[in-house]
Image (cartoon, rainbow, N blue to C red):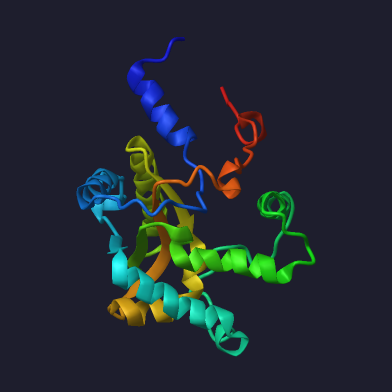
Amino acid sequence: MISSPAQQAVDAAITSRRSIRAFLLTPVPREDIEAILEVAARAPSGTNTQPWQVYVLTGAMKEALSSRILAAYADPEQNKLHTEEYAYYPREWVSPYIDRRRKVGWDLYSLLGLTRENKAGMAAQHGRNFEFFGAPVGLIFTIDRIMEQGSWLDYGMFLQNIMVAARGRGLDTCPQAAFTQYHRIISEVLGLPASETVVCGMSLGYADSGKIENTLVTEREPIAKFVKFME
């Protein structure tokens, strides 16, 4: 079956999405950010609740948040006071999930020339999360605490829409759960109301194609591993 141009464009936007970890300083026009979020807001949500809230950070505000988090991250005593507000990852890792997690981690570190013994290098690379990997735009996503699990599922579709809409405009992203550990700092710097929970962060900008970390392409299981056709 021959794909139509529309099908090809949609498929290309989805399949070219990768977690980019080094960005150019090139600014992203505000109108592009607004257009991406308007498109993303067409995500489905149960009874049209639209549970998402987005904080778009650039310039001094982005730098202020990064500085505060990095200061806490660099101080072992301070850092251990910051814990996630919700469990993003399983409490107990089992195969095949732990295997996939380890593989992507070591694939990235290998590209960067980081060995298992180089704990400082790995910590520094993780700290790049809090600089939004050098992207000109940082996004922080929150949800009202009153919302339940179904709304979090809806939120995932909204986040995916952002990433796909960005690719359609030649932009790249990196969704970042790493920010959730520092929800108290985020709330203070951004002045979040007490009713909002930090869901995650995201970097948005133009990929720096000259950086080796951006050559990482993660593997996906063939559909035969996770799909059952039942007639």
User: Which residue is located at x 30 percent, y 76 percent?
Assistant: 190
- Name the quadrant containing residue 81: bottom right
Vertical arrangement, residue 164 with respect to residue 193, above or below: above
- Name the quadrant containing residue 55: bottom left
Instruction: Say left or right for 66 vs 95.
Output: left
Q: Residue furthest top?
A: 1
Q: Residue furthest left?
A: 31
Where residue 201 appears, as percent x and y from the top left, is 42, 62
Does any portion of residue 149 appear in the rendered image?
A: no
Q: How many marks?
A: 0
Vertical arrangement, residue 28 with respect to residue 124, above or below: above
On the rendered image, what quadrant is the C terminus found in? top right
User: Which residue is located at x 41 percent, y 33 percent?
Assistant: 13
Q: Which residue is nearer to you in this view: 110 or 41?
A: 110
Where residue 76 appears, as percent x and y from the top left, is 62, 85
Where residue 153 appears, as percent x and y from the top left, is 42, 53
Q: Which residue is nearer to you in this view: 181 or 121?
A: 121
Q: Which residue is nearer to you in this view: 101 or 73?
A: 73
Where residue 178 appears, as percent x and y from the top left, is 52, 66
